[in-house]
Image (cartoon, grey):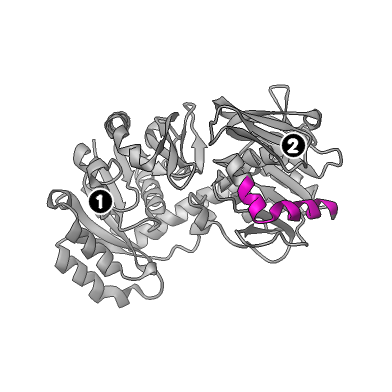
């Protein structure tokens, strides 16, 4: 069955977006296409239809293919818990937490899972579009690589290399990649394309010709900057907008060091009556903020310490005294309580830390991970909320008697006695148009009529149109074998 792999000259060159656009272009040709990424590193995960988790980018690519997301689309997911270690997810389920230096010992097991998932996708689709990770030029990692040329060689998949001209030095990026990779790897590279060009692409004609002449690789085009890229769910926290606009309900989100599942914010960014800002290290929570969001975290106690180191605990207390609202989601919900205990050392050293004390609840980390799609009912409005849970730990306390929602008739989340502080384990809640409109209306934001899902679909179509207009899409698809 045909497959094609898109690798990059570096991280964040636009591989995920390019694969999503190519997926939609293939779907519109009537091709049964599926996305695949052998290994991803991200704390922004999606819960799949088969009860596992994969990188958010592969969930978006599945949507571009008209498919439900499945664990086979991203068999290895690494979720960083510290600068040196990460949780390892294989085919949707956690199998280990390992230090970077020890990761190579898992290679054989992980590669077997990668190839198994790839073969299943091949067997049930006409075309598999594969996304690499980082860059194949990181030859110091080649011996244990399963994400780029290690996979391409094992699965015999042709490769196209994408370079990012917006960063500068794209000629050296592409030519240099050929210079340093193994010649047997280079044989699999069938061409290149240039992404994120601003201005008149004809100005790069000489550079484009030089790359073709120097490498012998075929060029598949120069893609101008896609202006609506920011409207698609971001996988990297670095892609989050610092500020969406200057007027409207002032919402700030704390950019925690291990922020996770931050795509919860995407629907809010697109609301015309909401001004959403990310507050980073060293910054203060603005005194005129209406709502502060504590997002999910891959290391709740670690990020609670990070929060305190920024002085945000003091800012939050002042914000609440001024009558401001606070929403904690997942790990952010746990931080709002009186205490967080991790007796088994699941997320780090065993211990117990005091929480922010803004909710009368206590959280205990437990070995079992809740990983499921849910349909809840918002307690205040009675509206349904479709979302997902992806967390460890349980939370109990007096404020749970005022739940945020009901899930299978059981209370979910907690609300303070004055109604200004709320916590919930539900991710993806703002993607529901009716709930989002009603919730924002309660904070004084007029209904905008925004249809988030329809907007994402429209942007995926526009992305495919953009790629069709500037790249040799037919030639790319013809490369698959």
Q: Which residue is drawn at 74% across and 56% down?
A: 315
The residue lying at 44 percent from left, 28 percent from top is 93
Left or right: 234, with 22 as reference point: right
Which numbered tag is attached to residue 140?
A: 1
Q: Is mark 1 on a helix, strand or loop?
A: helix
277 w.r.t. 129: above or below: below
Q: Is the magenta stretch mostly helix, strand or loop?
A: helix
Q: Is residue 341 above or below residue 226?
A: above
In the current view of this chain or complex, which residue is farthest to the top? 409
Q: Residues within 10 Å of mark 2 (few under 14, many from 20)?
A: some
Residue 55, by quadrant, is top left
The numbered disc on residue 338 is 2
Region of the chain picked out in magenta, as a range: 305-321
Based on the displayed image, in which of its 4 quarters is residue 241 positioned?
A: bottom right
Q: In percent of the image, x 64 and y 35: which residue is there?
A: 426
Q: Can residue 295 be seen in this view?
A: no
């Amino acid at each position: 069955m045909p497959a094609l792999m898109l690798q990059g000259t570096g991280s964040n060159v636009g591989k995920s977006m390019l694969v999503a656009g190519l997926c939609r272009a293939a779907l519109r040709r009537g091709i049964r296409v599926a996305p695949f990424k052998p290994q991803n590193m991200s704390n922004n995960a999606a819960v799949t239809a088969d009860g596992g988790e994969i990188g958010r980018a592969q969930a978006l690519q599945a949507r571009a293919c008209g498919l439900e997301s499945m664990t086979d689309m991203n068999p290895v997911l690494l979720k960083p818990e510290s600068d040196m270690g990460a949780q390892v997810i294989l085919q949707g389920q956690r199998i280990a937490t390992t230090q970077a230096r020890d990761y190579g010992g898992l290679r054989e097991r992980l590669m077997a899972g990668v190839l198994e998932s790839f073969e299943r996708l091949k067997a049930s689709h006409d075309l598999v579009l594969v996304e690499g990770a980082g860059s194949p030029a990181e030859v110091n990692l080649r011996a244990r690589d399963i994400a780029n040329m290690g996979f391409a060689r094992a699965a015999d998949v042709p490769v196209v290399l994408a370079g990012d001209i917006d960063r500068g030095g794209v000629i050296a990026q592409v030519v240099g990649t050929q210079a340093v990779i193994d010649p047997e790897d280079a044989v699999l590279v069938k061409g290149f394309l240039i992404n994120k060009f601003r201005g008149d692409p004809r100005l790069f004609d000489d550079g484009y010709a030089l790359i073709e002449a120097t490498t012998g690789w075929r060029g598949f085009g120069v893609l101008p900057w896609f202006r609506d890229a920011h409207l698609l769910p971001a996988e990297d926290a670095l892609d989050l907008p610092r500020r969406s606009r200057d007027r409207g309900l002032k919402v700030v989100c704390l950019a925690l060091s291990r922020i996770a599942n931050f795509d919860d914010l995407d629907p809010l960014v697109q609301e015309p009556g909401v001004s959403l800002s990310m507050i980073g290290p060293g910054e203060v929570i603005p005194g005129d903020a209406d709502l502060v969001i504590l997002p999910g975290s891959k290391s709740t106690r670690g990020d609670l310490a990070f929060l305190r180191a920024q002085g945000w605990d003091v800012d939050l207390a002042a914000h609440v005294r001024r009558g401001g609202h606070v929403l904690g989601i997942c790990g952010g919900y746990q931080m709002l309580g009186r205490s967080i205990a991790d007796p088994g050392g699941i997320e780090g050293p065993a211990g117990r830390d005091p929480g922010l004390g803004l909710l009368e609840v206590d959280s205990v980390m437990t070995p079992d991970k809740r990983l499921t799609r849910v349909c809840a009912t918002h307690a205040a409005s009675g509206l349904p909320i479709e979302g997902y849970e992806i967390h460890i730990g349980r939370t109990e306390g007096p404020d749970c008697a005022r739940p945020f929602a009901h899930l299978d008739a059981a209370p979910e989340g907690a609300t303070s006695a004055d109604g200004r502080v709320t916590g919930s384990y539900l991710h993806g809640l703002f993607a529901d148009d009716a709930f989002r409109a009603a919730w924002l209306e309660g904070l004084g934001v007029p209904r905008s009529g925004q249809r988030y899902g329809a907007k994402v679909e429209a942007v995926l179509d526009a992305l495919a149109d953009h790629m069709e207009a500037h790249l040799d899409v037919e030639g790319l698809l013809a490369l698959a074998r």
